[in-house]
Amino acid sequence: EMIMDSDCHDLEDARFIGHVSFQPKKEVIDKYGLDEDIGGTSRYDYLDNYMSVTNRVNYDDEEANSDNTAFLRVLEFCNLVDDFYDTDGTRYKGRLEIYVLNSGYGGNLKPVFMGPLPLIDGKRKPLPHIVPLIFEHEPEYPYRGLAYVEQLLPQQKELNTMRSYLAQSARRDARMYVTPKGALDADAMVNLRSGEDGSIIEVDEQYAGNIGRVIVPIAHGPVSGNILNTMQMAEVDLERNTTISPAALGQVTKATASEIMALEGHTQSEYGRHAEQRDMFLVNVVKRCLAAHVASLYDVGDSEGAEQNLDEEGRELDDDQLESKRKEEGIDNDNDNSYDNNLGSDFRSGVQNEEESEEPEQIKEIEEDEPDIDPDDDEIIGLASEVEPVRKQVERQRAGMKLVLLDPEGNLVQIEPKDIDSDFDIGFSEAGRSPIARAEMRNAILQLSDKMLQLIQVSGQKQGAVSVLAEEMYKSIHEQFEFPNNLSYDYIQNKLSEQADNVASDPAPNTAAPQQEQPQQQPQEEPPEEQEPTDKKETVNEFIQQLASLPPDQALVALEEAFKDDPKVLDVIQKAKNMEPEQQAEIVAMILSGISGESNDN
């Protein structure tokens, strides 16, 4: 349950914000030091008022373990207008007020606790620790929330009313009959009500020939068509007011591709608007967490919790036991070294600073036996002797701790309060993709892969304006279609640089070792090397003979596969496919003769 300033026109102009919650009574009593005999209440949900049909079950027996008085309604109220003055005169902007909203606690609603707001933002403004999540609000009032269900409630209530009337009519639509008095005896009535198969009912002879007068069914009137028409109109209005997309409701429609793309858009769907409000809510939460981290680095905490006042069994020690425990551990209460938040860790409570150690210089009083003292001067000197010298106001630096973390690479990173104590711009970005978006991106990559390869090749040639244009076009395609990062231009260039560095770093082939081993090699290993050209010629001749034995069309297909890297030969082969078989045979013979001539030259 939230308490918000619904009259403000801007979030920064809010005067207060509060939150009401149910907390265990014992916990609240221990935290704020309340009376033990304070009355409690049972915990109920906020929507119980709207659920009039259901009733909460309470225990009447007080001896039972019930929750009738186990909770208290506590209001955490952030007052952003009034200031809080500490006992030392320090002024804090805004204040935190805690109230117990319970009839057993007086009724005048005085705060049980009042203190400064625990957090401040980077601009040194008070920061309430309560963040509301409002999906819909009035245009001029951000704290006046609008529930999406409220615009559907009138039609839903009307539908419920009509259906309740139909349900009552269906329950009353029972089979009822009329019979003359005395026409049927008691046994006949019982057999008629039981409806057993094969039952025989006897009637008097006076009804012979006119059995239809014995039992006459009562006909019920049909439900008025106006009720059905009203229900249909309410359903149409309900569908018209339902602004959520059918996909969100799980409805299957015959939507076109344009409609699907419109639903996928972030700004044109209910998902997008709600996601934006959710992101703003998370940004406010992150700002509070950042402020809490800054406060934890500036303040290492007071003595509360520094010493566990519990025995081995977990029971709290009394004053005498605690005093004896301190003596056993050698802890002196007078010289307790507590941390001073203003002076830092180098100053302790047992050590006085110059301002506290220096005693004010007092003017010595003149002895009475001196006769030359004027009474008026004596009075002035007496007053002056009681005046302390004015202390200088010195600004004390806040001492902060340091936080040491490990980065993803395993290096130590030292974080100080000044590193995070600032007004940052925090935002969220969508990381996931829908199945439709992934399918579209996959199709775009397959369709544009050839063009992207050509652009990469042109950009790598460094031919002036053409290379620059190809590089920019590649970057534009990658950005507009939101391709993965491993297809970006910079990523590819980095990979090429890494490959070049690896090639440069590889050691040169060692030629000295083979020269030293040459005398040990036998001359019989050299002849196989001279036989390689002969084997190559034999292989080429066999290939030419096989192609010559094939039909011209099949030989062209084989030649096309063999010369797929030679564009000139491929052009000749493509033209030959459209010729007559006789001309194709001539082209094949010409190509084979060229191959044979090259092999003979080699």
Image: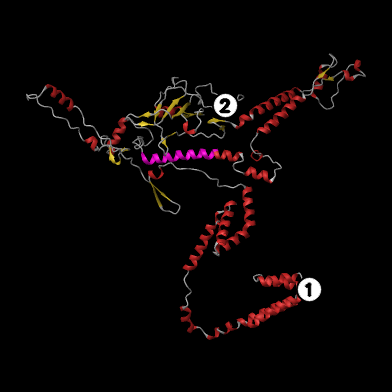
Q: Position of residue 259 (x, y in %)?
A: 67, 43
1 or 2: mark nearer the eye: 1
Going by the numbered disc 1, the residue's amino acid type is: Pro
- Camera-side residue: 529 or 421? 421
Q: Residue 581 carries which label?
A: 1
- Camera-side residue: 496 or 372? 372
- Camera-side residue: 201 or 5? 5
Q: Where is residue 519 in the image (x, y as percent from the top left)?
A: 48, 84
- Label 1 vs label 2: CA separation? 92 Å
What are the residue bounds of the magenta stretch?
277-300
Assign the magenta stretch its main secondary structure: helix
Residue found farthest to the bottom: 523
Q: Which colour scheme is used?
A: secondary structure
Q: Which mark is residue 48?
A: 2
Residue found farthest to the top: 181
Q: Which quadrant would residue 602 be assigned to in this image?
A: bottom right
Q: Residue at x 55, y 83 (%)?
A: 525
* Crowd tier of the residue under label 1, counting other residues whose Cα lies within 10 Å: few below 14, some 14–19, many 20 or above: some
| Mark before the other along the chain sequence, 1 or 2 | 2
Q: In this view, does 444 lie to the left or right of 399?
A: right
Residue found farthest to the front: 465
